[in-house]
Amino acid sequence: MELREQLRQCNRIVVKVGSSSLTTAEGGIDPARIQRLVDAVADVRAHGTQVVLISSGAIAAGLSPLGLARRPRDLATQQAAASVGQGLLMQEYTERFGAHGLRVGQLLLTVDDLTRQTTYSNALRTLGKLLKLQALPIVNENDTTATHEIRFGDNDRLGALVAQMVRADALVLLSDVDGLYTAHPADPGSERISTVADIDALEVDTHKRGTAIGSGGMTTKLQAAQIATSAGIPVVLARADQAYAAMTGQNVGTFFPSDAKRRPRRLLWLAHATSARGRLLLDEGAVQAVVQRKASLLAAGITAVEGDFVAGDPVDLVSPEGKVVARGLVGFSAEELPDMLGRKSQDLADALGREYEREVVHRDVLVVLARRPRRR
């Protein structure tokens, strides 16, 4: 079966749509564009495929009602625009999906919500229940309260994280361009790339921005594709008016086949959604044990501790060259670890008690981020 054709067999798809694909050049909601998207999603739903929609557009939808000519740069005005626009956006979705007999549910998240295990689990439970109740979840970044994220427009990454969370069979990123090009689409001689087998091997300039309404760009879409494909989820990048074709495996946009088997959800969360609270510097033997032999990290292999963290926090494991090679949930606090460094488990048990004999980071809560070649 052709790789793209696998999308026709998907049970669950996450679709992310950007602001510029939903609004007019002036910043208000474009009813025709939203209707086309809703019709496409409803058609896919009618064939039995579950859809989770990641929708930008709250800030953009609030511009025109507030008399703003362009996307504001200051945080307070962005938050005000999002506050006005989010309600208008959901009203449009509720009415238009309702005409197809579909109920929608709103879930507002920040990337920070997904970095904490408790709130991550809560979001997962809500999404799961909405899908079980046959409602169509509509997820957006909570632009009214977000701080760092709102300035960088992270809904592409949010889409990849949600795709991991709900175990989607595919991620479709809809934009105002019809795929990835060998150069900027406006440049003479630029050609659309149909399939990208290896994102790391790409040599294209993706830093030119598109419209003034949207907040993302091609760089963030490639980052999202990298996150999703590494989790075993294929990705399609296409223009918004190609939504149905993209979701049904037709030859549109740019296709990124998955390059890995699915890993446990907890490890995907650890690798892509967490922010490290500290760093553990390892000696060469510990790096080899963690990366090559998939072993737990013991105190004997740690040379230094950086940061302020408590037991259960995510920490980065760093090679002698300063490269982050893994991330894991640490079993001890930053205050406890300095007295343990370089000491064998039996020595720790004799000196500090049996509770210090265990692993610093257990292999079950550790994910390798960078592999190093074996030494000859």
Image (tube, grey):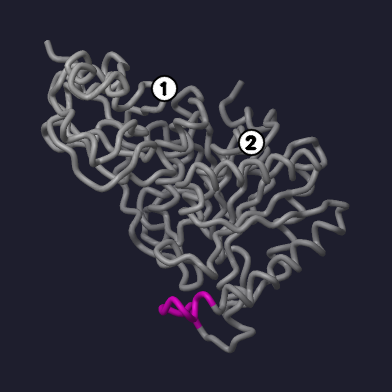
Q: In the image, what residue occupies the spot 56% across and 72% down?
A: 59
Name the residue at 30% across, 39% down. Answer: 315
The one nearer the camera, 13 or 237, is 13
The residue stretch that appears in magenta: 70-79
- Quarter holding the N terminus is top right
Please provide percent x and percent y for residue 47. 80, 37
Q: Which residue is mark 2?
A: 249
Closer to the chain start, of discs 2 and 1, is: 2
Q: Was residue 77 drawn as part of the magenta stretch in this picture? A: yes
Q: Measuring 87% from the left and 59% from the top, which residue is drawn there? A: 99
Up-down: is 240 above or below 323? below
Dot 1, how many residues are within 10 Å of its Cα: few (below 14), some (14-19), or many (20+)? some
Q: CA distance from mark 2 to mark 1?
A: 36 Å
On residue 364, the disc is 1
Residue 290 vs residue 211, the one in the foreground: 290
Q: Position of residue 363 (x, y in %)?
A: 36, 21
Which amino acid is tagged 2? Answer: Gly
